Amino acid sequence: MAKQIKIKEIAKMAGVSAGTVDRIIHNRGHVSPESQAAVEQALAETGYKYNLHTSAISLKREYSLIITIPTAVEGEYWGFVQKGIEHALEEYSDIAIDHSYAFYNQFDIFSCKSAFERIPDMKPSAVLIGATFASETRILCRRLEDAGIPYAFVDSVIEDTHPSVSYSSDQNICGRIVGRLLNLMTPRDSELAIFSTRRIGNERALNSMARMTGLHAYFKGIKSRRVIKESKVSVIEPATSRKDILDFLQKNPDVKGIAVLNSRGYILADTLAKNGINDVKVVTFDLTVNNMRCIQDGTISAIIGQRPELQGFHAVKAMLRILLYNIKEKDAHHLMPTDIIIKENLPVYKEIFID
């Protein structure tokens, strides 16, 4: 175990007194901007670990955190994000923090708009955002910035915003990985398809667009002449989706690989299996309960994992540090490891991230 550096050592590095370091760490009393900057740099360089539990007792202040993410269903992607958030809040339960959720339907931009509009008026101490629609998120972020309310992102990062911290995957790289996998799994003379989700409103989901861009960039980079077609499915109307999938494959018999750019790959995989279509490879996102089932039975070939529980856990922990000490992290954006899960290594991921 690494040795915890002492306050006296931090003080020596920063050229200030131990008392000054203590005041900065525990947010007690005024210090000069120069001393604040010097101590913050020393803290960052040494990786000093704050004791959140001790600080919670000493600060005796209440905080409010609003968490706005798509509706969280147990066993689905956002359910795992929420599980990580709740884990962090439980671990730091001695901090007086009131938290509430502003859920929205990720397939309906109007639901997102309604949820986001009321958040700044609730005057939270901080906001944790799981963004789906870029335009609505930018509006919310501008209002939070105008009110001086810090916010964090999980799952994605929106351009032209200034989060205090974010935890997400590089979605462009994820798309490139999907392209490479499908290129390896399918005959080179076959066609491929990209399936995204049909949403209410005119705006596509940010992550899906970035993944699509990455996938096309991969094939452009290898100078491939692959035909890549596009289609959509509706999560809200599964019966319609099943019909649309079968109609698409009937019209495009040369498609032998499909990228589902969200966590609902099981909808397509189940449709193929029920209709005896077993020569189409499916790659999708996120280690959900249904996707794991399809990996196990072979109807999904690979899953791109983004560690949603860890995203939620680390984002909450980072926001608590910011609220307690008013110290921004040196690197605000944190990229999560990208996992490739197939049938052979599925048991390892189930044990580590699901149980």
Image: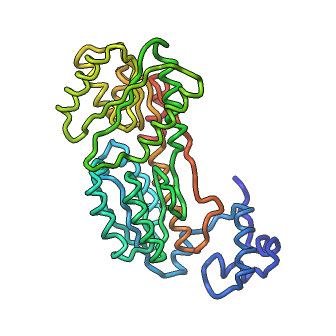
Q: Residue at 59% of width from left, 23% of height from top? A: 222
What's the image's color scheme?
rainbow
Residue 263 is situated, as x and y percent measured from the top left of the image, at 37, 38
Q: Judge by depth and name the residue closer to the eye, 242 or 76.
A: 242
Q: Residue furthest bottom?
A: 30
Q: Is residue 206 left or right of residue 290?
A: right
Tell me how many marks there are.
0
List x then y, in percent, for residue 59.
Answer: 53, 81
Which of the two residues, 252 or 335, is positioned nearer the viewer here?
252
Residue 64 in the image: above or below residue 115: below
- Which is more toward the observer, 54 or 194? 194
Looking at the image, residue 248 lies above or below residue 71: above
The residue under the point 74% across, 62% down is 45
Image quarter hosting the C terminus: top left
- Image point (33%, 42%), residue name: 75
Residue 173, horizontal then vertical, whole percent:
55, 38
Q: Residue at x 34, y 75 (%)?
A: 122
Name the quadrant containing residue 44. Answer: bottom right
237 relative position to 338: left or right: left
Where residue 303 appears, as percent x and y from the top left, is 44, 31
